[in-house]
Amino acid sequence: MDLVGELSAYIAQEFLTERGPRAVGPADDLTRLLDSVHIMLLARHVEDTYRVEVADEEISLDNFESVEKLAAFVRRKRA
């Protein structure tokens, strides 16, 4: 599974279970699907799973608005 797929699956499994099974598309607006606590937990998951550091100021729409943007952020941090 690619990075976008991994992140989409994680978000759906961990944060969207109360809404029933739901696929998260690469361009879906995560700010409409997740609350601020979920975004912080997602940042922690990214740090732990992909071994990158996420600074507070990096938790922004530029990096966390969609799975595509989040995957691009992880790729940049790992380079």
Image: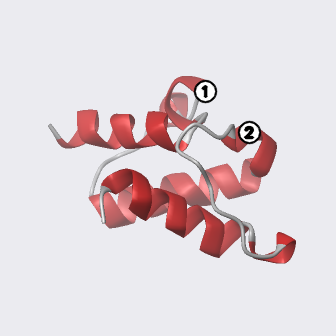
Q: Secondary structure at mark 2?
A: helix
Residue at 47% of width from left, 63% of height from top? 45
Residue at 57% of width from left, 37% of height from top? 27
**Mark-to-mark CA distance, 1 and 2:** 8 Å
Query: Along the horizontal axis of the image, is 1 left or right of 29?
Result: left
Q: Looking at the picture, which amino acid does disc 2 mark?
A: Thr
Residue 31: assigned label: 2
Crowdedness of circle 1 by 10 Å Cα count: few (<14), some, many (20+)? few
Q: Position of residue 3 (x, y in %)?
A: 33, 54
From the viewer's perspective, is residue 1 above or below residue 56? below
Q: Which quarter shows the N terminus?
A: bottom left
Q: How is the image coloured?
A: secondary structure
User: Could you say which is closer to the camera, residue 59 or residue 24?
Assistant: 24
Residue 61: assigned label: 1
Crowdedness of circle 2 by 10 Å Cα count: few (<14), some, many (20+)? some
Q: Looking at the picture, which amino acid does disc 1 mark?
A: Leu
Residue at 37% of width from left, 35% of height from top? 73
Residue 16: assigned label: none
Q: Position of residue 41 (x, y in %)?
A: 60, 60
Residue at 84% of width from left, 75% of height from top? 18
